[in-house]
Image (spheres, rainbow, N blue to C red):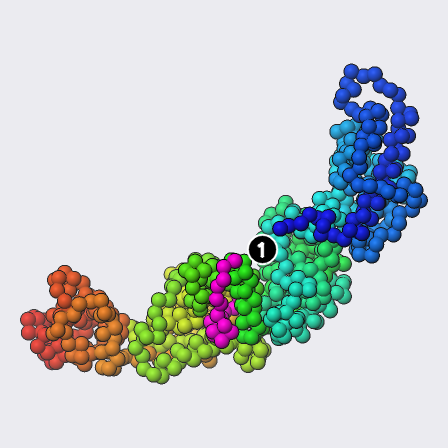
Amino acid sequence: MDIAPAERTDPAGLAYLWERLGRVEMRVRDAVAARHATDPAPDDPYRGQYLTPEGAERILRAPAAFHPGSAAGLPDAPAGPDGSRLRRLAEGFGLLPLDEELLLVALAPDLDARFEALYGYLNDDLTRRRPTIGLALDLCGLPVAGPGRFRFSAAAPLISGGLLDITEPDRPFLSRTLRVPDRVTAHLLGDDEPDARLAGVLAPGLVAPGHGAPGHGGPGGPGPYDPLVARVAEAALTGGGPVHLRARGGDAGRAAVEALAAAGRRALVLDVAALATDAETARVPHLLATEARLSGGGLVVGPIEALEPERPERARWLRELCATASDVPLITYGTKNWDPLWSRQSPVPFTVGPAGTGRAVAQWRQALDAAATTVGVPVDVPGDDELGPAVASYRLDSEQVRKAATVAVRSATAERRPVGPQDLRAAVRGQNGAGLERLARRIDPAVGWDDLVLPPPTRRQLGELALRARHRDQVLGQWRMRPGGGRGRGVIALFAGESGTGKTMSAEVVAAELGMELYVVDLSTVVDKYIGETEKNLERIFVEASEVNGVLLFDEADAIFGKRSEVKDAHDRNANIESAYLLQRMESFDGIAVLTTNLRANLDEAFTRRIDVIADFPMPDARQRLALWDRCLGPGLPRDDSLDLRFCADRFELAGGSIRACAVTAAYLAAEAGKPLGMAQLVTAVLQEYRKLGRLVLESEFGPWLRNERTVAPG
């Protein structure tokens, strides 16, 4: 159950606030008495539309919303208790004692409705129920032409800090109305909820001070981010400019939050991508700075790559934030380097690499336990031995892990069973954005290792591909086995072999083994007749592929990864530029890509050096063809006793794709005949496949099954 704001703060601090407001009431009483002494008793038919002195007296005799106690007899405001919110607010915003008094004068009608009518009486206008600048100065005993009026300038702490709003700017200066924002009032009463005006752009901090961030005495234990977190925390607290974390395979957003938690600061996390138009973002920097000062927190802003050139208002927004929140710890993060145009101050840069499998498991464990608690139903989650292999190949930030863990727990709970690796994999696939689907065809893998019929060397190469994908962050990131040169942490494989030998299916099996989706690049969306457009399309594919947990498949890759040739005309030069771009881009790729080709010799030799795994797919031998025939026909298709699959395997030298096509054709023929599948239908299907492939039909291959065939070549 939630509790009232007054119960969430210390009683001494709240009593001090009431005492200070009691002093304001005494000054209001004096002002009303002075006005009453000089006010003629009006005999007016419109008396009910304004407050008479007698009416003001009746309001003053009404019970107060707080008890002023002995405040009326004190010449100066007493010092507040240590830790009281009013005292901390004055220290945090650099307020003078006069600023405190002006703030309390403006705050009074929000805490006691009597002040609305009294301020209306003193303003000579009952429709203006808040203090004006002139009235506030008068209640504080200051001349309206004195230096006190400069406490309302744009650079003064009350105004620049967002503690006081001046409304009705079209009125004369002294007649402008003062208002304390609701968030400031709520803070003084003990409420720590962020400003409602930041809803939609401000996310809750991932780790709060004192709650045990992983690697800082929390449930995650020590982790590889600890030294980095300590350095980032020190840099953020030095002031004078932001700190920028560039992600290189690591979760920079979480590292930023943990750094603030290590410094004892609450993290206010803002998603730059959530910012929309100028009208919505213009006030956000000031609101953020005020919120950070009120809560004693720091700001985490990212991903910084959302500050793209086509959205210049976001860059202006960040520049304004850096200027407004110069005294607040500010950490930005993203995959891009800092642009000096974003701020007058240069940030302290850090690079965030992969965190390692141990930390990823701890992060998943924490997210799963939290999701199970939220669901409220007892549910078993995988142990670390099972969780490690299930999540090792994924690259997710903390928010994606939280969402995926919640989905996995809910899915398992709905079926009243423990959370399994299949739930985690389905939940992770749900975190993939739709951007790549516009450029490639997504396949949800539905095959496994048992569906492959391949020679042992090819299987070993596929296993090595899966192994590299699982441990790339550790080998290429933590151990830095591919340093320098802007090299990415991707894994690239080449599947070479004749058509139908299982290259595409093998890519699907590898994706299933890694718990990922397969994205098949549609060459029609890539290749463009206009110069430079093909490279732009490929760049979009590579960028989107780096953002998802999936396997990118370039089928018939020699169409775009072909050899460079001697330049004889402009067409050759442009083709070579395309190949050179691909060579550079594959070097910096951070995802998992598979290239397939029927003609390995057509690929440029420079691509071979950049390929991590090369798997050759030979034509199947007789033993493998027998297994393929049996699996392609499947257990559900009725078979006649005369069906001789060994004969088919020994006689017909077909690839796996052709065998599958024959099996499907034969199944249609059996369904039309209404009988179990026999050799007649199977041989007819093989004959059709031979003709489709343009192969000769030899009697030495078909034997007695060709007696009734007229188109038989002598063998």
Question: Which residue corresponds to the image point at 62% horizontal and 51% vertical from the top-left?
Answer: 1
Residue at 47% x, 59% y: name it.
410
Residue labelled with disc 1? 273
Q: Amino acid at mark 1?
A: Ala
Q: From the viewer's perspective, is 247 left or right of 13?
A: left
Residue located at (63% from left, 59% from top): 205
Q: Is residue 592 magenta?
A: no
Give the percent coordinates (x, y) of residue 210: 68, 64
> Principal SS element in the magenta part?
loop
- Over which residues does the magenta segment extend? 376-397
Q: Is residue 385 magenta?
A: yes
**x and y, in percent, of residue 392 in the image:** 50, 73
Query: Front-most of 295 and 155?
Result: 295
**Residue 646 percent location from the top left of the image:** 18, 79
Residue sitting nearer the eye, 108 or 350: 108
Question: Picture quarter containing residue 146?
Answer: top right
Residue depicted at x 37% and y 72%? 509
Which quarter of the rendering shows the C terminus?
bottom left
Question: Disc 1 on helix, strand or loop?
Answer: helix
Residue found at the far left of this picture: 708
Check the image and report above or below for 74 versus 315. above
Using the rendered view, name the quadrant where residue 464 is placed. Answer: bottom left
Q: Nearer the viewer, residue 475 or 84?
A: 84
Q: Is residue 548 visible?
A: yes
